[in-house]
Image (tube, rainbow, N blue to C red):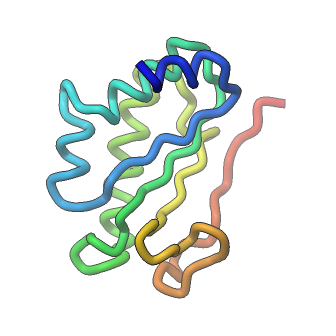
Amino acid sequence: KNMITGTSQADCAVLIVAAGTGEFEAGISKNGQTREHALLAFTLGVKQLIVGVNKMDSTEPPFSEARFEEIKKEVSSYIKKIGYNPAAVAFVPISGWHGDNMLEASSNMGWFKGWAIESKE
């Protein structure tokens, strides 16, 4: 209910997905919250989406680029099906626990150089 109330007036949504083994899979599963929240955002007219891949410190190995890319690929596939253009969506690997990539670039994820997005102009 709270998600619907806030989203109905939003221009942009930040979708946070957990990178931990099992956590991401639960969220992206058929009835998972990741799918539900992305679909609600699109249905309610939110055109711009940012995906924060959180808990990167919990991946195996920690801060795994391969895990980030796997999640990015799977989320991109789903959001494309519901109507978003994945090329226009920013994906950012973060760790809220440690603050990695929250306010400044993280040395733990030196492989992340930002994102290249397509604008709709």
Asked which quadrant contains residue 35, the reply is top left
Question: Residue 61's spot in the image, x, y percent?
Answer: 25, 80
Badge count? 0
Q: Is residue 10 left or right of residue 72?
A: right
Q: Nearer the viewer, residue 90 or 66?
A: 90
Q: Residue furthest left?
A: 22
Query: Residue 29: horizontal and vertical position, in percent?
Result: 19, 34
Q: Nearer the viewer, residue 110 or 10?
A: 10
Q: Is residue 55 above or below residue 32?
A: below
Q: Residue at x 26, y 70 (%)?
A: 59
The correct choice, above or below, for 68 with respect to 106 in the image is above
Rendered-image quadrant of the C terminus? top right
Where, quadrant-wise, is the N terminus in this rendering?
Answer: top left
Q: Please give the name of the residue rendered at 71% of the width and 41% of the height, measured from the top-left corner.
A: 118
Q: Residue at x 49, y 79 (%)?
A: 109
Relative side of 68 to 44, left or right:
left
Q: Where is residue 99 in the image (x, y as percent from the top left)?
A: 51, 74
Quadrant in which residue 62 is drawn: bottom left
Q: Considering only vertical position in the picture, is 84 above or below 113?
A: above
Residue extending furthest toward the front: 2
Q: Residue furthest right?
A: 121
